[in-house]
Image (cartoon, rainbow, N blue to C red):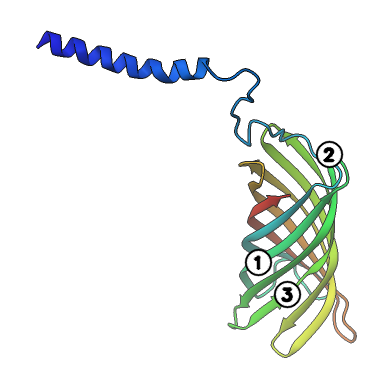
Amino acid sequence: MRRTWFLLLIVFFAGMAIPLAAQEEEEPGSPPIESDWDSFTPDLYARGDKSFIITLGLLIPTVFAGDGMEGSSHNIKLGGTGSLAFNYFLNAHWFVGGELGGMFASTRGKNMLFIVPFGVRAGYQFVVSRFEFPITLMIGAAPQKYLDKGYFGLIIKPGASAFFRFNPDWSFGLNANWWMLPEWPKNRKNVVGNFLEITLSARYHF
């Protein structure tokens, strides 16, 4: 019985030694095997780098200011939002791009409000190891639809995000953006609506 165990141990250690010997006998000058991530420097961006961003999440109505408004006196409930965006890096930190989004929310009267904002965006990104923190500002137009009423207005959307670079191609993150929607309609009261956007994003880098 002891002899059998002894032979098994010899076979086991011999099997372990074969791969090690094969590695030592690797042809001189052959490149080492490396993963894509090992050859990637996450804090290095250059002019011409691009990213495509898909975003989904919640839109929270906050303060509505204007003629006859009393801060939070609105009838809009919690809504949903999503967007597609494109970034083009000018250097290691600054980028410009565009964004197309949409939101929907119901009112206390069970009617629906729809807004489809689009515009240009610019930002600055901090990088710490595999974590990236972009600060953005989007300015554009925001067509709105409520019942049979429509309005073509302005949107100003500052925000900040935190992303984790999962691999050279993809990063995933959390966003907090503030929507400012001024309305200056003819023959009606002026109002500025404010929403807080909390969303999740996936970015594809290329």
Q: Residue 127 in the image: x percent, y percent?
A: 74, 36
Would you name the residue on which mark 1 appears?
Answer: 81
Q: Label 2, secondary structure: give it.
A: loop
Q: Label 1, secondary structure: give it.
A: strand
Q: Residue 66 in the image: x percent, y percent?
A: 83, 71
Q: Label 3, secondary structure: give it.
A: strand
Would you name the residue on which mark 3 appears?
Answer: 115
Left or right of 128? Residue 47 is: right
Q: Amino acid at mark 1?
A: Thr
159 or 76, nearer to the observer: 159
Q: First in sequence: mark 2 or mark 1?
A: 1
Q: First in sequence: mark 3 or mark 1?
A: 1
Would you name the residue on which mark 2 appears?
Answer: 92
Q: Amino acid at mark 2?
A: Ala
Q: Residue 22 in the image: x percent, y percent?
A: 47, 19
Q: Quadrant of residue 113?
A: bottom right
Q: First in sequence: mark 3 or mark 2?
A: 2
Task: Give how far apart the Cα atoms at labels 3 and 1 are.
Answer: 9 Å
